[in-house]
Amino acid sequence: MLGKIAFFFLLALVVYALWKKAQAPKKLEKDASPAVKKMIKCPVCGVHFAEVDGTWGGNRMYCSAECAKKATEAKENSRDDDVQH
């Protein structure tokens, strides 16, 4: 009989401790907040992207290597047009 009382007492204690832990307010860590990133607009497609995710093409930053390539090709084509005139 005493064993059953002790078992249920310990069980109630564990349930109470878990319930209190679940009710406690969550503490935010300083590192948990997202870092602020500088956003840049791609000169080719106009999408905004984080500076750290960009790709350099010449002296400008683009959202992707594809946009950097398009800009380079467009620049070369405009030079070819200038030479022909």
Image (cartoon, helix red, strand yellow):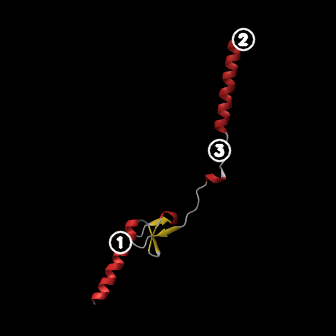
Tell me residue 38's x, y (percent): 54, 67
- Residue closest to the eye, 64 or 47: 64
- Which residue is identified by label 3? 26
Left or right of 66 in this view: 13: right
Residue 76 position, x and y percent, is: 34, 79
| Extreme residue toward the left, this view | 84
Judge whether 78 appears above or below 68 on screen. Answer: below
Q: Which of 73 and 38 is in front in this view?
A: 73
Dot 1: what SS?
helix
> Which one is earlier in the sequence, the residue at label 1 or at label 3?
3
In the rendered structure, the answer to whether residue 24 lies left or right of residue 82 reads right
Looking at the image, residue 31 sits to the left or right of residue 48; the answer is right
For label 3, the SS is loop
Q: How far apart are marks 3 and 2 (CA)?
A: 38 Å
Q: In which quarter of the image is residue 66?
A: bottom left
User: Against 85, is 7 above or below?
Assistant: above
Q: Alpha-carbon neighbours of circle 3 within 10 Å: few (<14), some, or many (≥20)? A: few
Of 54 and 49, nearer the camera is 54
Mark closer to the chain start, 3 or 2: 2
Q: Which mark is residue 2?
A: 2
Circle 1 crowding by C-alpha within 10 Å: few under 14, some 14–19, many from 20: some
Comes first in the chain, label 2 or label 1: 2
Q: Which mark is residue 70?
A: 1
